[in-house]
Amino acid sequence: YAVSNKRLKKSMKETKVKNKWRLSKVSKFIKSNYEDDKNNIIEEYNNKGYRDAKIINDTTYLNEDNTITIEITLEEGEPYLFGDISFIGNTRYTNKELSSQLGIEKGDVFNQSILDSRLFGSQGGTDDISSLYLNDGYLFFNATPVEIATNNNTIDIETRIYEGEQARLNKISVQGNTKTQDHVIMRELRTRPGDLFKRSDIMRSQRELGQLQYFDPEAFDV
């Protein structure tokens, strides 16, 4: 029971249990949604390190009250762990600095989504390796994690770094502005032509422009 039945039921987002107290909320059984939810179950296991988890049998049958009972038989397998995580191709930051930024320790439960988020993060994130580079001018940075060995359910990762050259800002222009003068917008920017590219400054400029109340922040296209 690597994942509790309660968590598995939550994974089945589209295939819901009938609630006898809320008849108007009864869900219909939709085959395509059920197939998606079976994939969600396996994904839940994968996120817990059980990369070999699989559904070996599932059965559905109709009850007398016109509801459907679902029985799913799982094979969980054994959990996988992170092993050694190494870096090649990096010159700007040391292996120690990148390991610290990654924040994954040898022996942690293997989770591909966590690895991806620590490498690439989100557009507004700051704690991932991608942000480390993008806030230091490395606009063309890329990282490719490669599994190089699996021993006793421990996975070693080699992270291949492409840094590229640092980029500087050239031209900054404004389009679609009808509410105010362009210079009002330009003076709010944290970036200037000639500055080193820094994603965090660009994101901060966008937030502060949204606070002017001239524009819809969700409509910005930077």
Image: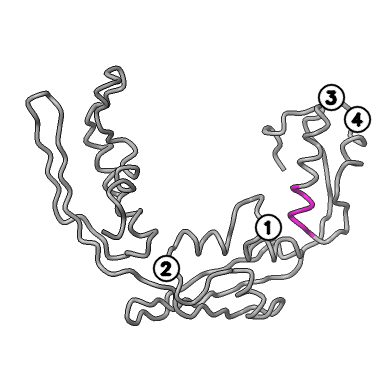
Q: The residue tagged with tag 2: helix, strand or loop?
A: loop
The disc placed on residue 181 is 4
Say which label, 3 or 2, has the lower sequence index. Answer: 2
Q: Nearer the viewer, mark 1 or mark 3?
A: 1
In the rendered view, tell whether residue 188 sits above or below residue 63: below
> Residue placed farthest to the left in the image?
64
Tell whether position 202 is magenta: yes
First-in-chain label (1 vs 3): 1
Spatial CA distance of label 1 from label 4 is 32 Å
Left or right position of 100 against 74 = right
Q: Label 2: which residue?
A: 109
Q: CA distance from mark 1 to mark 3?
A: 32 Å
What secondary structure is the stretch in magenta mostly built from? helix
Q: In terms of sequence position, does the residue under pointer 2 or pointer 4 come before the other?
A: 2
Name the side, left or right, on which 94 lies relative to 45.
right
Residue 157, compared with residue 36, is above or below; it is below
Residue 70 x %, y %: 16, 40
